[in-house]
Image: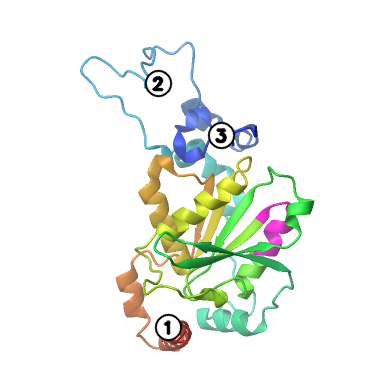
Amino acid sequence: MAAPPPPSPFAASSRHLVAPRLRALLPAAAMSTSTSNPSSSTPAPRNGRPVSGAGEQPQVPHASLEIAGARRGLLAGFDSLRRPYRAFPALAWNRHVETIFAAFARSLPTVALRRECLRTPDDGAVSLDWVSGDDRTLPLDAPVLILLPGLTGGSDDTYVRHMLMRARSKGWRVVVFNSRGCADSPVTTAKFYSASFTGDIRQVVGHVLGRYPQSNVYAVGWSLGANILVRYLGEETDKCLLSGAVSLCNPFNLVIADEDFHKGFNNVYDRALARALKTIFKR
């Protein structure tokens, strides 16, 4: 019988989950808040929770805010977060130039993908694109990374491919989650995907972990994919099966984001996304 995977960092307080690799990054002050002190005068815990005093409720931080002491120490251990941001030379003067340059000038890495179609409970379908051959070359406990592209995006987008190649070069097993109708995924139901619908990502995470129960599973999302991912994390809270997640370019306030799409040069992006959506809806 396969050994169970390590517990998710979302499932317990950080004092139990500070891995040796992270301990080196945490300042001493942060570590003192994440580990128990035998000489402390704090009363012994009952049922896994510390007792603060008579008649008082114990103040236990939410687990998702205390991953490896992130609020107090982990982020402070990364020097790059304290340095000024330096954008790409020659393109940094205008965000639209950066966006258009990346769309037309960035290379599309060549990689063989193996598609798996996953049927959803409402008879819908999503596509999972795995890197072909990884089953033969990677160990069963290799970390798994799920990629969630932005609106109408999929495994054939350059930004997705570059992330896939970078993670794969580090020994990660990578799978791209193509939402309903995206990247030539079939459209089999009237229900599409949206920022408020997390049923598909929940099923995908469970499916991936079921295939690789010895692995830690992580996720990265861009734009709308990031919005769906963060909503899923919030809904799952301490029951989340993911060991970690990264949100990139997330339009947290969708109302404001939609309004901005109709202003100035942003109308170019609005029309491009509208054309891509119309192509999917015509299937």
Q: Nearer the viewer, mark 1 or mark 3?
A: 1
Q: Which residue is mark 1?
A: 281
Q: Is residue 82 magenta?
A: no
Q: Residue at x 66, y 61 (%)?
A: 130
Is the magenta region chiefly helix, strand or loop? helix
**For the residue marked with disc 1, what is the amino acid?**
Phe
Q: Is residue 14 visible?
A: yes
Of labels 1 and 3, earlier in sequence is: 3
Q: Residue at x 31, y 79 (%)?
A: 259
How many angstroms separate mark 2 from mark 3 (CA)?
A: 26 Å
Is residue 138 left or right of 73 when viewed as pictured?
right
Residue at the far right in the pictured view: 137
The image shows residue 42, relative to residue 144, as above or below, that is above
Q: Residue at x 51, y 75 (%)?
A: 186
Q: Identify the secondary structure beneath mark 2.
A: loop
Report if the CB atoms under discs 2 and 1 are less than 8 Å apart. no
**For the residue marked with disc 3, what is the amino acid?**
Pro
Residue 45 location, x and y as percent? 38, 16
Magenta extent: 164-173
Residue 20 location, x and y as percent? 64, 32
Report if the CB atoms under discs 2 and 3 are less than 8 Å apart. no
Of labels 2 and 3, earlier in sequence is: 3
Q: Identify the secondary structure beneath mark 3.
A: loop
Instruction: Work out which quarter of the rendered image holds the N terminus and state it.
Output: top right
Q: Nearer the viewer, residue 85 or 157?
A: 157
Q: Which residue is mark 2?
A: 48
Q: Which residue is mark 3?
A: 27
Quadrant housing residue 47? top left
Q: Identify the secondary structure beneath mark 1.
A: helix
Of labels 2 and 1, earlier in sequence is: 2
